[in-house]
Image (tube, rainbow, N blue to C red):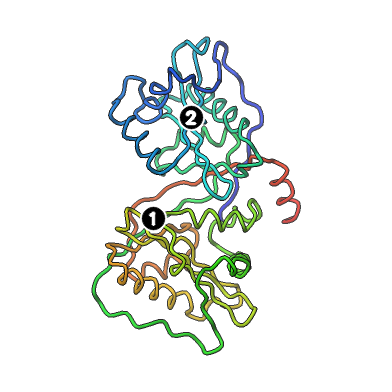
Amino acid sequence: MATLSPTHTDLPRPDGVVYAPVPRGRKMDALSLLLTGSTQGSRAAVEHFMGFAAQQSLAIDQLWAAFEGSEKGALLASVLIVPCAGRTAITFLSPVAAAQEATVHATLVRQAVAAIDVSKTRLAQALLESHHYAQADVFVQAGFQRLAHLVYMQRPITAQHIMPLELEPELEISTWAPSRRKLFEDAITASYEQTMDCPGLLGLRDVGDVLDGHMATGEFHPSLWMALHRGNEPIGVLLLNLVMQRQNLELVYLGLAKAWRGKHLGRKLMHHAVRLAQEHHVGHLVLAVDELNVGALKLYRSMGFAATVRKLALVKVTNEETKRRRDGETK
């Protein structure tokens, strides 16, 4: 089971360091530091990133930096907080080149996250390459919790024949419609009971925010979102979105209620996902899974999925009252 790391509430503040939003005139330098590790890094890389952000409608105005002496001094570190759907935000941090820089970076992250509008963002997240140990330690010092190591996997889509989905007669599949939102929310909630899929997230967000976040992953199509139910009883969900300019299909979420696990429904739904990937003429079906979710990993590997990369996910609740309430409910 994924464990949550203790937080550190007090960080020493090195003398002569100022933490503040980046002035407009220093934005390029701060982004260069973030992307390349140097204020003199590739301007082409910065411009490419800014173009990508504009294309994807990503807000990049929550850019903070640690300055030496004053806001006109040398840039020591930078952090970017990008708001996302579902009242979450992704946090990006400049490279940590030496251990003695960790306190400056951690204080910067803490200050930037503290400035987040908690009415719009409930959860700050960071996703790091698994070997970025120094950055991971910085985020923990700044109050983030290690959530899970995620294994990213993919399966090539070939022309092999996949049998159509066949379910028991009493089971129904409904595709997404706004009028069915509660059905999808109830099915997602039911799938969380004793889940092994990032259990540390449970209770940190409203299910409505979770649903909105899933919907904003890639390109949403109602026909690729399915809820299983038996009458009014929610059983599970299969959520798929097109990604990478429709080159791949992503398994955004697959979950089943506890009583319906171990009945081969997950395998049937995954075969259906492969069939849908064929129909959309994509190159791969892709997904990410908690490495401690042994059952899911076994299923995916048996179906030809191979790991491509491993990343560490960290999270921090922006409104600490939410976390205290969750922790109280789980004791």
Image quadrant assignment for residue 279 = bottom left
Distance CA(mark 2)–CA(mark 1):
25 Å
Mark drawn on residue 79:
2
Q: Earlier in the sequence, mark 2 or mark 1?
A: 2
Image quadrant assignment for residue 97 = top left
Whether residue 4 is situated above or below residue 160 in the rendered picture: above
The residue sitting at the left extreme is 159
Closest to the observer, 60 or 309: 60
Q: Amino acid at mark 2?
A: Val
Task: Report x, y in % for residue 43.
Answer: 30, 25
Q: Considering the numbered disc 1 on the image, is that residue within a helix, a strand or a loop?
A: strand
Whether residue 46 is situated above or below residue 310 in the rendered picture: above
Q: Residue at x 62, y 57 (%)?
A: 208
Q: Considering the numbered disc 2 on the image, is that residue within a helix, a strand or a loop?
A: strand
Q: Amino acid at mark 1?
A: Tyr
Q: Nearer the viewer, mark 2 or mark 1?
A: 2
Q: Taking the image as drawn, is residue 94 in sight?
A: yes
Whether residue 206 is situated above or below residue 176 in the rendered picture: above
Mark drawn on residue 152:
1
Mark drawn on residue 189:
none
Label 1: how many Cα within 10 Å (few below 14, some 14–19, many 20+): some
Q: Residue at x 62, y 65 (%)?
A: 189
The image quadrant where one finds the C terminus is bottom right
Judge from the rendering whether residue 258 lies leftward or rightward of residue 215; answer left or right: right
Judge from the rendering whether residue 142 lies leftward or rightward of residue 292; answer left or right: right
